[in-house]
Image (cartoon, rainbow, N blue to C red):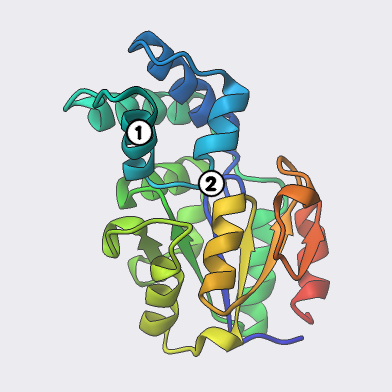
């Protein structure tokens, strides 16, 4: 099917950031007295906005994370990105094919605008994403699994939700896309199919996407 808009998640879909950020998140939470393994972090927080981390920790422990938590965590993540972040293999080629075919696309991420930009500059994907194609949970207040971010992106891009397709790799992201009334395809590089329930289909490598998009 040809869609009028392709909406990409960022972390884990365009940039290979999930192993880096979840390792650091697990370590930082553990350091603060909230024992968390890498597997815990992926299960509970992958695909979510920062407010969800605060909410779950307080719900489970009755304690609030320190006021400077976000700033410290992001500083650690950005330093690690500069040292080791790479684009997901094949992501740039898919964006090139979409652009050449005249298929509109954008990115809608639970991460902050700064996080998106840092990752894109490091990997060279910034060439494909001018500011008007970048949307963050910061823009809407509620991150995934709420549909707000995807609906905001579609509205700003002038496309009806039912004509959009979302590319996601997290359970929360798939839930958000389904709630927005959009088709969604699950990227299984890190997350098995059974944890992406609700997706219209699945793919394990970026070179499978052009056929899905009818290119």
Of residues 140 and 54, the one nearer the viewer is 54
Q: Is residue 151 visible?
A: yes
Residue 156 found in image quarter? bottom left
* SS for dot 2: loop
Q: Indicate the quadrant containing the C terminus: top left, top right, bottom left or bottom right.
A: bottom right
Identified at 58% across, 33% down, the residue is 42
Identified at 33% across, 26% down, the residue is 73
Identified at 75% across, 71% down, the residue is 200
Residue holding disc 1: 59
As displayed, is residue 179 above or below residue 110?
below
Of residues 196 and 211, the one nearer the viewer is 196
Mark 2–mark 1 Cα distance, whole angstroms, equals 25 Å
Badge 2 density bin: few <14, some 14–19, many ≥20, Cα 10 Å = many
Image-based side of 196 in relation to 45, left or right: right
* SS for dot 1: helix
N-terminal label among 2 and 1 = 2
Image-based side of 116 in relation to 13, left or right: left
Q: Position of residue 110 (x, y in %)?
A: 42, 52
Badge 1 density bin: few <14, some 14–19, many ≥20, Cα 10 Å = few
Residue holding disc 2: 11
Q: Position of residue 33 (x, y in %)?
A: 36, 10
Q: Is residue 18 visible?
A: no
Image-based side of 174 in relation to 24, left or right: right
């Amino acid at each position: 099917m040809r869609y009028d808009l392709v909406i990409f998640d960022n972390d884990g879909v365009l940039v290979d950031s999930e192993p880096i950020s979840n390792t650091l998140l697990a370590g930082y939470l553990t350091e603060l007295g909230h024992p968390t393994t890498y597997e815990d972090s992926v299960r509970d927080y992958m695909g979510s906005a920062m407010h969800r981390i605060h909410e779950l920790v307080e719900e489970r422990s009755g304690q609030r994370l320190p006021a400077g938590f976000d700033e410290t965590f992001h500083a650690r993540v950005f330093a690690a990105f500069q040292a080791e972040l790479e684009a997901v293999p094949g992501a740039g080629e898919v964006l090139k094919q979409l652009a050449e075919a005249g298929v509109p696309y954008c990115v809608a991420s639970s991460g902050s605008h700064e996080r998106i930009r840092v990752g894109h500059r490091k990997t060279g994907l910034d060439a494909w994403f001018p500011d008007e194609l970048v949307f963050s949970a910061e823009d809407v207040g509620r991150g995934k699994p709420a549909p707000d971010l995807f609906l905001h992106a579609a509205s700003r891009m002038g496309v009806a939700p039912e004509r959009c397709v979302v590319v996601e790799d997290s359970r929360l992201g798939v839930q958000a896309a389904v709630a927005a009334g959009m088709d969604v395809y699950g990227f299984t590089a890190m997350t098995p199919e059974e944890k992406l329930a609700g997706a219209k289909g699945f793919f394990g490598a970026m070179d499978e996407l052009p056929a899905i998009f009818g290119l």
